[in-house]
Image (tube, rainbow, N blue to C red):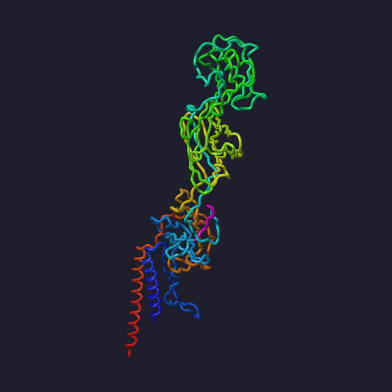
């Protein structure tokens, strides 16, 4: 009789309906994987083998298999919601030793900074140390630091342009030699009666100058031989002397130049073309000085050095300036300001450095602590940086265009000591402009936000404007995920049959990528499940009808007398 076959059909249909109902119930469960019921037929064993009249014994449920197909992705407002697009599962742990696996990427942070799911299980991946990801297998529970410690500024770089068309600071003066009877250096270009001797001959044609502190051609200075001739007026005399001096300077390797003019009395004066403290000139010998500065006149042969008159609060003492924030050895912020002063010497600039408005120490030289000591920036005629010359004293950093800025080193607490790179500065006619200011320090900060990249890299952003890798998600794939043991709460446990693969990061080794701010929806197709429910309902009804028919047949046999 066919009762057994029908009963097995009823049991199978009931199991399939259970599976379908479970799928429908979890159609809105994030990361859920639907299951399908698979059947097999039954045959009774026979010692005589199969015959032409062998009838099956019904059906059985071979397995209820979960389908690990991709679910659709939907966006959320939580940056720690992470969806896997492709192969792989999130490793989770509650004790750091036993792992489960999930496709549900709904995560949050607990009060200790661990990334957990709604059940308190910790998400595992690769940890980070000092911003460097450290791979590990097995992966470790991920956590995010609530604060970031400060970092002392040690390096800074400035990329900017100074204007070749800018004017000299009006407060800057130039080194000069002038008649001693004049209290202050006379103005250039003033006219007057001819005072000097107009004839240059063998008795008054030599001059030895020390100029701008540059190396001299001899032990005492640059030797100048003036052209022997008689000039018609003081204008021609000044012009000729200037030409002779500058030609001699070029021949002796000097990069400095001078201007020669005369005062209202007709006496000559000589000024360095350099400006400020870089500008120095003195007569240290020769026969021409007395005649050039007026017959028999006493002359201030030692000259007067130029003055910077630099004051960070007075814009007339510099041409341009820029500032950036730097951090000391205790994480306190300071303003590092750099002031650029154009000199009369072509392509030469003086540069001053201040920390919080006070003179910075240059290259560790404490001898002039508290006073502004300029460094010199030099450019080519096309505006390319060529040299940075620091003030004398101290020890310059080893490198191109570098200078050390400090607040006194070990004598100051907390300390500031920064190697500043200026070799990326340029000089063009475009005007002063800052392209970039960069330095490697920052203050302490508290956690402000998190982001997760497609490769699983977790970046923490802090209130100090810094971001740092806090870890990286790890994924685990299985050759036969259908063999995983479902333990509820969207978790699976590894089995031998599942075939666990080595842990890796999203996008590598056949693993899918991840998408932050998204979750993977259930892969249940609700329409298909409803159709399957109708099919299994009809199968259940048909098997019940088969039992009813068998019952009627049995009743007929019983009624035979």
- Against 367, residue 131 (above or below) is below
User: Camera-side residue: 76 or 376?
Assistant: 376
User: Camera-side residue: 536 or 158?
Assistant: 158
- Against 492, residue 505 (above or below) is above
- Quarter of the picture containing the C terminus is bottom left
Question: For the view shown, which residue lies furthest in the bottom direction?
Answer: 561
Q: Residue at x 51, y 50 (%)?
A: 150
Q: Quadrant of residue 32?
A: bottom left
Q: In the drawing, does residue 201 fall left or right of residue 448?
A: right
Q: Quadrant of residue 213?
A: top right
Q: In the drawing, does residue 14 fall left or right of residue 46?
A: left
User: Camera-side residue: 53 or 89?
Assistant: 89
User: For the magenta stretch, what is the residue range?
Assistant: 124-131
Q: Main secondary structure of the magenta part?
A: strand
What percent of the width, then of the height, locates residue 495?
Answer: 51, 68
What percent of the width, then of the height, locates residue 322?
Answer: 47, 37
What percent of the width, then of the height, locates residue 509?
Answer: 53, 56
Determine if residue 165 is in view.
no
Q: Residue at x 41, y 59 (%)?
A: 520
Q: In the drawing, does residue 453 fall left or right of residue 420?
A: left
Q: Is residue 125 magenta?
A: yes
């Amino acid at each position: 009789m066919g009762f057994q076959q029908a009963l097995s059909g009823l049991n199978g249909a009931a199991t399939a309906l259970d599976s379908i109902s479970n799928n429908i119930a979890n159609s809105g469960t994030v990361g859920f994987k639907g299951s399908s019921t698979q059947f097999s037929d039954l045959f009774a064993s026979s010692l005589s083998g199969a015959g032409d009249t062998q009838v099956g014994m019904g059906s059985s449920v071979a397995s209820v298999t979960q389908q690990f197909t991709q679910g659709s992705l939907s966006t959320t407002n939580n940056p720690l919601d992470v969806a896997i697009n492709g192969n792989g599962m999130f490793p989770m742990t509650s004790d750091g030793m036993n792992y489960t696996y999930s496709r549900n990427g709904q995560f949050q942070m607990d009060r200790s900074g661990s990334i957990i799911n709604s059940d308190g299980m910790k998400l595992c991946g690769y940890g980070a140390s000092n911003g460097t990801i450290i791979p590990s297998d097995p992966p470790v529970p991920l956590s995010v630091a609530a604060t970031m410690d400060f970092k002392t500024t040690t390096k800074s770089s400035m990329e900017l342009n100074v204007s070749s068309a800018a004017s000299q600071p009006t407060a800057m003066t130039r080194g000069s030699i002038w008649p001693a009877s004049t209290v202050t250096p006379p103005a250039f270009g003033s006219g007057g009666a001819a005072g000097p001797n107009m004839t240059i001959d063998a008795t008054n044609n030599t001059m030895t100058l020390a100029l701008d502190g540059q190396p001299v051609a001899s032990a005492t200075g640059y030797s100048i031989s003036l052209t022997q001739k008689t000039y018609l007026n003081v204008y021609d005399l000044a012009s000729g002397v200037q030409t002779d001096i500058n030609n001699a300077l070029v021949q002796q390797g000097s990069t400095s130049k001078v201007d020669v003019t005369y005062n209202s009395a007709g006496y000559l004066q000589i000024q360095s073309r350099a400006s400020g403290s870089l500008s120095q000139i003195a007569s240290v010998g020769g026969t021409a000085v007395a005649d050039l500065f007026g017959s028999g006149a006493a002359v201030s042969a030692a000259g007067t050095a130029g003055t910077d008159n630099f004051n960070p609060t007075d814009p007339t003492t510099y041409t341009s300036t820029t500032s950036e924030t730097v951090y000391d050895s205790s994480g306190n912020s300071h303003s590092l300001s750099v002031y650029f002063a154009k000199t009369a010497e072509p392509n030469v600039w003086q540069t001053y450095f201040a920390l919080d408005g006070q003179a910075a120490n240059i290259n560790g030289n404490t001898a002039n602590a508290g006073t502004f000591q300029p460094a010199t920036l030099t450019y080519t005629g096309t505006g390319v940086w060529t040299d940075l010359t620091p003030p004398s004293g101290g020890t310059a950093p080893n490198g191109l265009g570098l200078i050390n800025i400090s607040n006194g080193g070990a004598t100051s607490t907390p300390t500031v000591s920064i190697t500043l790179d200026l070799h990326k500065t340029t000089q063009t006619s475009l005007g002063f402009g800052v392209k970039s200011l960069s330095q490697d320090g920052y203050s302490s900060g508290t956690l402000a936000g998190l982001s997760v990249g497609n490769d699983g890299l977790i970046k923490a952003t802090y209130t100090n404007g810094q971001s740092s890798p806090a870890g990286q998600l790890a994924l685990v794939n299985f050759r036969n995920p259908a063999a995983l043991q479902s333990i509820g709460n969207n978790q699976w446990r590894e089995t031998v049959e599942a075939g666990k693969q080595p842990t890796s990061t999203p996008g590598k080794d056949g693993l899918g990528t991840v998408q932050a701010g998204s979750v993977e929806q259930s892969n249940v197709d609700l329409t298909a499940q409803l159709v399957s429910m109708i099919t299994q309902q009809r199968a259940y009804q048909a098997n019940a009808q088969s039992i009813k028919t068998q019952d009627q047949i049995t009743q007929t046999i019983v009624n035979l007398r």
